Amino acid sequence: MTPDEIGQRLLALLAPAAVTASVSGGQRHARATVDVPATSWRDAVRAARDDAELGCDFFDWLSAVDELAEGFDVVAHLWSTRHRHGVLLRTRVPREAPIVASVVDLFPGAAWHERETYEMFGVAFDGHGELRPLLLPPEFEGHPLRKEFVLASRVAKPWPGAKEPGEAEAGGGRRPMRPPGVPAPGEWGTTPTPAGAAGVGEGPRGGTPARPARERPARPAPGERPARPTAGERPARPTPGERPAGPAAPEPAEPGPPGRPLPGERPAGPPRQEPAAEPGPEEGSA
C-alpha cells in the first residue's frame, strides 16, 4: 500500500472521529502520518495493528514534541513486517494537562518509550502503572526536553564572543544567544550582578559587566617599517641589495722559527726539492 492508501484506510477505520491524514517527507522513505484526537489514541494504535490490510504488528518507537503554547505532540511509529510499510500516528495533548492513554497492553515494547517520554517531557500515560525514572536519577527535578527547561550548562559557561579574527582583542564580540526559558546572566546563580551595574545582560539587575576594550597599537603604513630601539638592542636589518658586513679577516702573522703547529693546523714539512735535469745527448758528445 502507498502512504496515501494507508492514510485513507485509517480514516475509514476510525470514522466518525476527527482524523486527518498526510504524507511525511523523505521521498522513498515517506510515511503516512495520521493525526487523531487524544481520545482516539488507543483505537488508532489497535486499528493499525489488527486490520488485515495494514497489519502493523511491530512497534518501532514513541516520543513527544514540545509545541510550546499549543501543547505536546505524542508520536508513534508502527511497522508491518508482512507488507513492509509503516505509519506515523500522532496526537496532541494540552500543556496544562499532558496525559494520554497508554498502549502497553497493545504493544508491551512501548513500556520504556512511555517512561522516557514521561521523564523527558512530563507527558503522563494513563494505565501504564510504572512511570518511574528510566534515565535520570530519582532526585532530578524537571523535564529536560521541554523547551522551557533551563539548561544550566549554557548559563554557567559564557559564549566566547569572538565573531571575526581580532574582534575579541578590540573589545567587540557577538552577543550570547539564549534559548527559550534561560534567564539573563544577572538573574542566574547565587551571586547576581549588583543592581545598577552596567553590562550586557538583561533584566533589572544589570547582567554581566561588559569587558573593557583593550588598546591595540597602530599598524604602520604600507611599505613603512617600524623603527627599532637602539639601546643595546638588535642591530638594524640591511637594506635590500646590501650584504651585511661580516667579521674582519685576521692579519697574516709574520714568519718565525718553526715550532709546534696550532690546534687544527697541519704541520709544515721541509721544502720540496726538484730533481736536477739530466744532460742531453748533444751535451755528452761535446
Image (cartoon, helix red, strand yellow):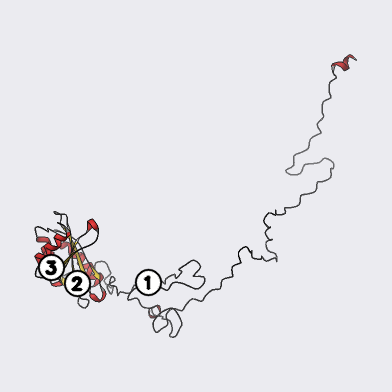
Quadrant of the frame with the C terminus: top right
Name the side, left or right, on which 127 lies relative to 145.
left
User: Which is more toward the observer, 222 or 251?
Assistant: 222
Q: Position of residue 234 (x, y in %)?
A: 67, 61
Local SS, label 1: helix
- Label placed on residue 126: none
Question: Mark 3 to mark 2: distance in Å?
Answer: 13 Å
Quadrant of the frame with the N terminus: bottom left
Point 37% across, 71% down: residue: 154
Q: Is residue 132 visible?
A: no
- Label placed on residue 42: 3
- Mark 2 vs mark 1: give the one in front: 2
Q: Position of residue 259 (x, y in %)?
A: 81, 41
Amino acid type at image mark 3: Arg
- Label placed on residue 154: 1
Location of mark 2 (residue): 92
Name the side, left or right, on which 42 lies relative to 227.
left
Q: Place residue 215 in its image quadrant.
A: bottom right
Residue at the bottom extreme?
Answer: 196
Q: Mark 1 or 3 closer to N-term?
A: 3
User: Which is more toward the observer, 275 or 8?
Assistant: 8
Amino acid type at image mark 2: Arg
Q: Is residue 42 visible?
A: yes
